[in-house]
Image (cartoon, rainbow, N blue to C red):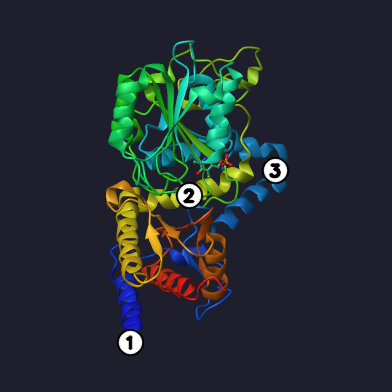
Amino acid sequence: MTALALAEQHAIELDAGDPLPTLRERFHVPPAPGGRFAEAAYLAGNSLGLQPKVTAARVASELDDWARLGVEGHTEGTRPWVSYHELLRAPAARLVGALAAEVVVMNSLTVNLHLMMVSFYRPTAGRHAIVIEDTAFPSDSYAVRSQVAFHGYDPDQAVIRLRPREGETALRSEDVAAFLRQSGEGVALVLLGAVNYYSGEFLDIEAITRAGHDTGAIVGWDLAHAAGNVALRMHDWGADWAAWCSYKYLNSGPGALAGAFVHERHLADRSLPKFAGWWSTDPSTRFRMGPVVEAVDSADSWQVSNPPILALAPVLASLEVFDAVGMPALEAKSRRLTGYLESLLDTVCAGCEVEIITPRQPERRGAQLSVRVGDIAAGIVSERLRRRHGVFADARQPDVIRLAPAPMYTTFHDCWRAATALAEVMDSGAG
Ligand SMILES: *Cc1c(COP(=O)(O)O)cnc(C)c1O
């Protein structure tokens, strides 16, 4: 056997012996356009998670109720629509480590960021800065800049972008905390990606939240790349609020409905400004159709509209799977897969010009390795990985590809395929 065949055999054995067997057969895995395998090695679940096979039936069930019952589906459906969103509450809360009353599934992520900032970005002349990462996802940057401008301040002055130390590729949580302690007096809001979309770094939510609070700031978290990826304890860690999308690790489909978390300490605070709609009001009196919101002391009071049931169905179907498996088991498997992929990149790709920019310590990252590919443009590398080898990764300009072994369905064998394919693509050069 060649060294390569031995390594492949090892990957197959790791899959067979893992304490959490893959749930791959429960997902639609795209066909592999190239290479010797029928199915893709899918390492792009941090961008768009795969479709669970159960999803189509769950959406069809709501379509059937609508066909069968018309408006009566609100109360007589298999899962009555009027209270449908409540079915998501408990599993979503367990997913992010929250109390049930602290979470709600609604809207999309950036919309939720705005709704949260309506309540939790309350700038004053002396305290109106917002702290984000310099590599914040652009939507978050645009959102905070527009909030600053909306309140009449200058985004170029008020938005503070944190950069890694010279020569480093990720922030250090202790540096973020130290910055807040030393220079936080003008900071109204800290809004960071818990897992950075670019570097894959998982920040220390608890320590940064504490430092933000010590300086008098509100601390919110974007969990887009953290929800369903790492085990979270948002309540215990004391975050003021958070929001996340459901189409990345949460496998709920393109543009799927998002989540929001508001810490218990804020739930009964009637002085918080909110943008209200008829779903903000107490459901027990909603249909009296009164003119004034009757607030409820839960995250539900940040809802505006009645939720789109056809869009909630895939989120519920997916959350049930996460709930059944549990984040601790998924996180543990994710560390085994990611560590294995890392060791392959260090050995199989040792000769090619690739550099892992994700932190090397397992507790500082989730299921993602971002790899700088020196010579060839990242877009060309990811294109060749997919077309020639059936390996799905994604490119982030100018020179990073992201490989995410999502523990639900990515296998050790997929990691082996990704690393060997990357070595071949890099070896084949720019031509
Ligand atoms: C994916 C992602 C978004 C996307 O925003 P949408 O409102 O869902 O389109 C925003 N922020 C971060 C950090 C993300 O990773």
Toward the bottom, the furthest residue is 1
Q: CA distance from mark 2 to mark 3?
A: 30 Å
Q: Quadrant of ligand 1?
A: top right
* Percent x, y of residue 14: 30, 71
Q: Which one is in front, 157 or 295?
A: 157
What's the residue at 40%, 63% (across, down)? Answer: 354
> Which secondary structure lies at badge 2?
loop
Q: Nearer the viewer, mark 2 or mark 3?
A: 2
Q: Which residue is mark 1?
A: 2
The answer to which of marks 2 and 3 sits earlier in the sequence is 3
Q: Which one is in front, 49 or 101?
A: 49
In the image, 255: left or right of 338?
right
- Disc 3 crowd rating (10 Å Cα; few below 14, some 14-19, many 20+) is some
Q: Amino acid at mark 1?
A: Thr
Q: CA distance from mark 2 to mark 1?
A: 38 Å
Q: Which one is in front, 396 or 76?
A: 396
* Callout 2 touching callout 1 (CB < 8 Å): no
| Quadrant for the N terminus in the image | bottom left
* Callout 2 touching callout 3 (CB < 8 Å): no
Q: Is residue 400 above or below residue 177?
A: below
Q: Which residue is mark 3?
A: 69
In the image, 71: left or right of 255?
right
Q: CA distance from mark 3 to mark 1?
A: 63 Å
- Disc 1 crowd rating (10 Å Cα; few below 14, some 14-19, many 20+) is few
| Quadrant for the C terminus in the image | bottom right
Q: Is residue 331 visible?
A: yes
> Which secondary structure lies at badge 3?
helix
